[in-house]
Image (cartoon, grey):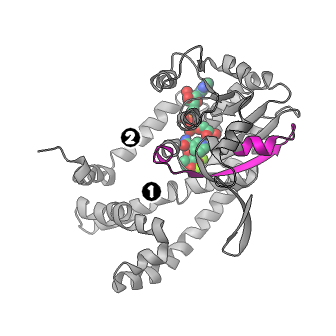
């Protein structure tokens, strides 16, 4: 475990250098890792573990798109791909990667198969932290921990294939066997994490729900929409509004931020741009701070969990989500974006 200094605060981080894959393979050599659910995280984590030489099986409902995807990805029925209950029985480590709402419905079945010494693994602090709403209370004689990749399962797989790792959080909720630390870190390495940052279940889920509703997904779309609308109302064309709101950000400026921070991105723009950005960023911060405070309070009060559980437990939740995504896709901003993206060299038809 390395202790690193993050802007003056010391934090524990596990690195691949001190905990190499060979050590993870040795620790997991007698385990059967059952990945339950093959949606977004399931494929990323199962495929990376398989490629890393871990004994991994997938449990998924038959006659579903996710089952077919697992078959396409090379999992073999009866050998490495099973109905959920069979996989639960075979697994010594259960990676519970159904959607958070589906985890509630299946919990009684999972619990039945959590015999002494097994481990229950999550990629989110949700089920345990909000157990007054989820009913997920594991038996005392199993290990319970999480590895939460800080990004999409799609990125976890892509970065693994590029030889890079995605940062993940890890936390131990219950150490029944005395092996929970070795098990959780080994899994973290095996699923393709680059670095593993220590947290607890509550802090993981509070920060995760805030982040995805905030700057990572909700706030960014909100601020894009507000600027696009302002430019359009003032007579700017859709392409101009899109280029100045999204395309320049994703293609030119965010890669610079990713590389070396905000000040460095600023320093690579004109002094005119820097003057304006330095004057205006605090106004945007002050305008949004109350919204972020409301958001965090809603997360901490369990209201975001309740909303997610209530909406995702409905039979037609998928159709409803698809309809809302369609509305976003068909908005003027993202339709303009479609044409702008088609102009990128990689998207051009060869002549
Ligand atoms: N999506 C991500 O990239 C991501 C990132 C970090 C953490 N997580 C966490 O990982 C976990 C899995 O998330 P996900 O986005 O991969 O899930 P998902 O929404 O893609 O669903 C996963 C699987 O659940 C199955 N499923 C849905 N309802 C079911 C039911 N009633 N019975 C049986 N199976 C059912 C689906 O077939 C699918 O294979 C969650 O705890 C999530 O918060 C996800
Ligand atoms: C990929 C995210 C947004 O980080 C994850 O938290 C999720 O819920 O999908
Ligand atoms: Mg999340
Ligand atoms: Mg997240």
**Residue 124 in view in this figure:** no
Q: Which residue is mark 2?
A: 326
Where residue 189 appears, as percent x and y from the top left, is 64, 45
**In this image, 307 relative to 255: left or right?**
right
**Residue 203 in view in this figure:** yes
As for residue 45 lying within the magenta part, the answer is: no
2 or 1: tag closer to the N-terminus:
1
Decide which of 107, 200 is in the foreground and name it: 200
Give the extent of the magenta segment.
Answer: 158-185
Decide which of 203, 153 is in the foreground and name it: 153
Distance from mark 2 CB to nearest ligand 1 atom below 8 Å? no
Q: Quadrant of the C terminus?
A: top left
Instruction: Residue at 76% x, 52% y: name it.
Output: 200
Q: Secondary structure at mark 2?
A: helix
Instruction: Residue at 64% x, 61% y: name it.
Output: 294
Q: Residue furthest left?
A: 351
Distance from mark 1 CB to nearest ligand 2 atom below 8 Å? no
Q: Residue furthest top?
A: 78
Tell me where residue 197 sits by quadrant. Answer: bottom right
Decide which of 197, 83 is in the foreground and name it: 197
Where residue 302 appears, as percent x and y from the top left, is 72, 48
Q: Secondary structure at mark 1?
A: helix
Q: Which residue is mark 1?
A: 221
């Amino acid at each position: 475990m390395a202790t690193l200094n993050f802007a003056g605060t010391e934090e524990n981080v596990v690195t691949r250098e001190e905990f190499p894959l060979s050590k993870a393979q040795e620790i997991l050599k007698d385990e059967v890792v059952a990945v339950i659910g093959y949606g977004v995280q399931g494929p990323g984590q199962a495929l990376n573990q398989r490629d890393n030489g871990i004994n991994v099986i997938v449990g998924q409902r038959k006659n579903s798109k996710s089952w077919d995807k697992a078959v396409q990805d090379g999992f073999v029925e009866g050998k490495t791909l099973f109905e959920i209950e069979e996989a639960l029985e075979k697994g010594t480590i259960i990676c519970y990667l159904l959607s958070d709402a589906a985890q509630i419905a299946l919990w009684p079945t999972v619990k039945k198969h959590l015999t002494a010494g097994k481990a229950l693994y999550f990629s989110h602090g949700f089920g345990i932290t909000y157990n007054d709403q989820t009913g997920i209370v594991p038996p005392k004689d199993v290990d319970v921990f999480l590895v939460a990749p800080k990004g999409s399962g799609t990125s976890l797989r892509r970065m693994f294939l590029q030889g890079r790792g995605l940062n993940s959080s890890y936390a131990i909720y219950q150490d029944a066997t005395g092996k929970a630390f070795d098990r959780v870190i080994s899994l973290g390495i095996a699923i393709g994490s680059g670095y593993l940052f220590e947290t607890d279940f509550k802090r993981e889920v509070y920060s995760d729900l805030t982040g995805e509703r905030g700057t990572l997904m909700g706030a960014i779309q909100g601020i894009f929409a507000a600027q696009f609308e302002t430019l359009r109302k003032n007579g700017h064309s859709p392409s101009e509004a899109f280029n100045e709101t999204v395309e320049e950000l994703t293609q030119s400026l965010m890669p610079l931020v990713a590389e070396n921070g905000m000040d460095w991105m600023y320093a690579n723009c004109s002094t005119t741009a820097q003057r304006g950005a330095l004057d205006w960023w605090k106004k945007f911060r002050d305008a949004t701070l109350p919204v972020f405070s409301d958001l965090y309070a809603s997360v901490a009060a369990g209201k975001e969990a309740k909303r997610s559980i209530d909406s995702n437990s409905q039979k037609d939740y998928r159709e409803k989500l698809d309809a809302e995504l369609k509305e976003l896709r068909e908005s003027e901003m993202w339709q303009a974006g479609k044409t702008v993206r088609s102009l990128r060299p990689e998207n051009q038809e060869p002549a």
